């Protein structure tokens, strides 16, 4: 079933609360601001990162991702707050999965956008690392540990792995 069908079904049945919407907007804005700040740090090498940083994750505000990402963001908040949370319907859960897939396939900074992670350009990789670093700052986590796992997970070659660690070094300094 197409994502559009799922969104039509959930829009009338299970609407996120105003609190959920506000949390999503605030959290996503902070994330994009962090990514933009990180992109500016690498922009001397890659000026395109200024544009990429400004419009990072903009698809989360689009028709296919907006409502599912509100729910997913709220779920992560609840889990991080130590609360049990389940989506109120299987339809909504499927919608979230499809929205995440849509997000990955619509944004070049995700390895899933590419047939092979090693097809990513240096700018794609730089934005990806800026995103990882923003997430690590949000969750007080080690970006290098995230990189170690992701390099293996996505099968980055040695040259791209070296580039990833160089970008991390440039950002963390």
Image (cartoon, rainbow, N blue to C red):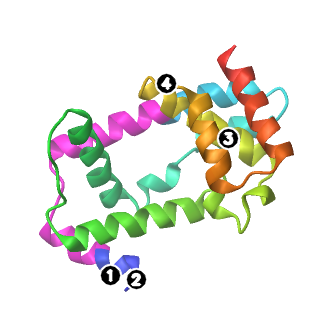
* In front: label 3 or label 4: 4
Q: Dots 2 and 1: beta carbons under 8 Å?
A: yes
Q: CA distance from mark 2 to mark 1?
A: 5 Å
**Highlighted magenta segment, given as a residue range:** 7-31
Q: Is residue 30 magenta?
A: yes
Q: Nearer the viewer, residue 85 or 3?
A: 85
Whichever of labels 4 and 2 marks the residue nearer the N terminus, that label is 2
Q: Which mark is residue 127?
A: 3
Whichever of labels 3 and 4 marks the residue nearer the N terminus, that label is 3
> Residue at 40% across / 61% down in the picture?
65
Q: Is residue 13 above or below residue 147?
A: below
Q: Is residue 76 left or right of residue 87?
A: right
Mark 1 burial class by Cα count in 10 Å: few <14, some 14-19, many 20+: few
Q: CA distance from mark 4 to mark 2?
A: 35 Å
Q: Is residue 94 left or right of residue 144?
A: left
Magenta highlight: main SS: helix
> Residue at 31% across / 71% down in the picture?
94
Residue at the spot of label 4:
137
Whichever of labels 3 and 2 marks the residue nearer the N terminus, that label is 2
Q: Dots 4 and 2: beta carbons under 8 Å?
A: no
Helix, strand or loop status at disc 2: loop
Q: CA distance from mark 4 to mark 1?
A: 36 Å
Helix, strand or loop status at disc 4: helix
> Residue at 43% across / 27% down in the picture?
138
Q: Dots 3 and 2: beta carbons under 8 Å?
A: no
Residue at the spot of label 1:
5
> Residue at 23% across / 41% down in the picture?
79
Residue at the spot of label 2:
2
Q: Is residue 133 left or right of residue 40?
A: left
Whichever of labels 4 and 1 marks the residue nearer the N terminus, that label is 1
């Amino acid at each position: 079933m197409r994502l559009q069908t799922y969104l039509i079904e959930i829009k009338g049945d299970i609407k996120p609360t105003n609190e959920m919407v506000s949390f999503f907007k605030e959290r996503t804005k902070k994330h994009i601001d962090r990514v933009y700040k990180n992109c500016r740090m690498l922009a001397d090498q890659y000026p395109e990162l200024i544009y990429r940083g400004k419009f990072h994750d903009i698809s989360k505000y689009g028709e296919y991702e907006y409502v599912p990402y509100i729910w997913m963001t709220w779920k992560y908040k609840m889990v991080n707050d130590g609360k049990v949370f389940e989506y109120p319907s299987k339809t909504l859960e499927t919608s979230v999965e499809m929205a995440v897939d849509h997000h990955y396939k619509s944004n070049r900074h995700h390895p899933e956008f590419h047939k092979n992670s090693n097809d990513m350009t240096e700018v794609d990789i730089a934005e990806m690392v800026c995103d990882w670093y923003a997430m690590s700052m949000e969750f007080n986590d080690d970006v290098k540990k995230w990189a170690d796992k992701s390099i293996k997970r996505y099968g980055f070659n040695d040259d791209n792995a070296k580039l990833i660690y160089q970008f991390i070094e440039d950002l963390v300094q």
